[in-house]
Amino acid sequence: MKKTLSFVLALLMLASLLAGCGKKAESAPETVVMDATGRYPLSESGELVLQEEGLLSDFVVDDNARVFYEIFVGSFSDSDGDGVGDLRGIIDRMDYLNDGDPNSGLSLGVEGLWLSPIFSSPSYHKYDVADYYSIDPAFGTMDDLKELIELCHARNVKLILDLPINHTSSRHEWFRRFVEAHQNGDENDEYYTFYSWVPQDVPTGSRRFRSISGTTDLYECNFSDDMPELNFEEPAVRQAVLDVAAFYLDLGADGFRFDAAKYIYFGDNGLGSDFWVWYLNRLRQLSPEIYTVAEVWDADAITDLYYSATNCFNFSLAMNGGLIAETAKGGDAGRYAAYVENYLNRVRGFNSAAMLVPFIANHDTDRAAGYLTVASGQMQMAANLYLLCSGSPFIYYGEEIGMRGSRGGANTDANRRLAMLWNDGDTVRDPAGSDYASQTGMGVAEQIGSASSLYNYYKKLIMIRNANPEIARGSFRAVSFEDSRLGGFTSTWKGSTVCVLHNTTLSPVTIDLASSGLPFTELRAVAGMEDAVLDGTTLTIGAQTSVVLK
């Protein structure tokens, strides 16, 4: 059963001293004595030297303010003809993602990759891990992962792994031993409390439990019977998931996306946040520049609770009902910018270098091109709003070519994870269970050669963003105009200021920069459905168009 946390820290220190799993980090100076894992320094009295609980050093922001690209591995690119995307397929497609030359204009230019889970798992999606220390054979080998990491780093691309630790597969060795311990009634077995469980007669409230075979006990499984939930009250569990992350950091991974982060303690965000503070404190001791982002799928008031530990995806901006889509459909860009400013001010109260992490769709949502069409210009405006913005935006694979996909009548997420449309002979196939029939027909092969394609539009936006580093990294100040839906922001970084303005309407807008208190004299970039002109201090922005001023 789950227990209180009153004495967990002491037990965790003891567990860290006794544990010897995982690879060692770089050697410490000879004057520093390390614990048994080789990861944490010890004081003269033999105690772990840790940051105070609840406090974190600032996130590293300058190098992490990157455009990331989410790859659902099994649906991206198939290298061996079996129809399943794999790590070798990603390696083969690196020139498409980032060719290593930011000035070539020959690749999309993304600066980070997020891989969906690649660990051994019985499912197509791999969010039920059966072995954290092996790569699923359908995806390749550990050597393939090492090669991909090395290739990414050679091209200044960060690679983060999706790490689901809230639950495992019911086929995991940990769960098998947990079940055996309960069947044997052996409360002294180290795995007896490895997963969350209760006796049969204990009320479970809104949490979901199922019977442990051959016993009267129940294990917790809020997502699926096949996804038992780990018990994070147990020091051995915390050490085990820490060792997993340490292993991949030692391998060269740059960080992690944490799946289902708010469910670590189901229904208790306070304890959940405390766990992530503990966890991230230790990971930053191993890798101070680690990139992490958590999935806390909830309102901002809940997401805020986790920002003292890690950046979080912003769900208020995402999906069809989010503020990006609302604004892209002709909404008030000033209101959008005011939200971003308020959000940044609030989360930076928890950590001074916290970032906005925006997206419009991912593997769990309907694809954006289904409700923000390319022909209407709404898809392009949505891209302007979140790629030409503060922080670290995430593109979902295929978004840049306008791929569509929704749950539909079959009510399956497989329809949101369809095969990437390379249209060049790639043998990757749609995942089992998908039945989506309204896919766009224009794939990568056709769009690369079309100057007006969505692919080339996304590439242009990333180049504009990179040419103006103030956009992502600077101090954000919202700009709005009375009686107008024109809006945007100024951003100052290292003494340089730029201004980004969005005209989301279907008509041109003209303003006088001088009388608007915007002392900008250079039109740095234009992106949209029409053009823009700066004549002295008079700026005219075409319909559904954005500008960067300096």
Image (cartoon, rainbow, N blue to C red):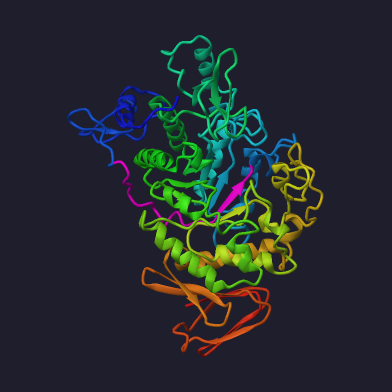
Residue nearest the viewer, comparing 296 with 268? 268
Which residue occupies the extreme right position in the image? Answer: 437
- Left or right, 406 with respect to 118, comes to right
Q: Position of residue 289 (x, y in %)?
A: 39, 47
Name the spot of residue 161 as percent of width and height, x first: 53, 41
Q: Nearer the viewer, residue 7 or 78?
A: 7
Badge count: 0
- Residue 257 vertical position relative to residue 492 in the rendered view, above or below: above
- Determine which quarter of the picture holds residue 115: top right
Residue 447, position as x, y percentages in the image: 73, 60
- Residue 70 within the magenta-colored segment of the rendering: yes
- Would you identify the image quadrant in which residue 72 lies? top right
Q: Is residue 80 among the parts visible in the rendering? A: yes
Image coordinates of residue 51 in percent, x first then y, are 28, 41
- Asked if residue 460 can be seen in this view, the reply is no
What residue range appears in magenta? 53-72
The answer to which of 449 and 369 lies nearer the viewer is 369
Q: Residue 198, relative to residue 543: is it above or below? A: above
Instruction: Please name the residue shown 58% across and 63% down the image.
Output: 323
Q: Residue at x 75, y 67 (%)?
A: 375
Q: Is residue 394 left or right of residue 446?
A: left
Displayed quadrant of residue 221 = top right
Q: Is residue 235 magenta?
A: no
The dominant secondary structure in magenta is loop
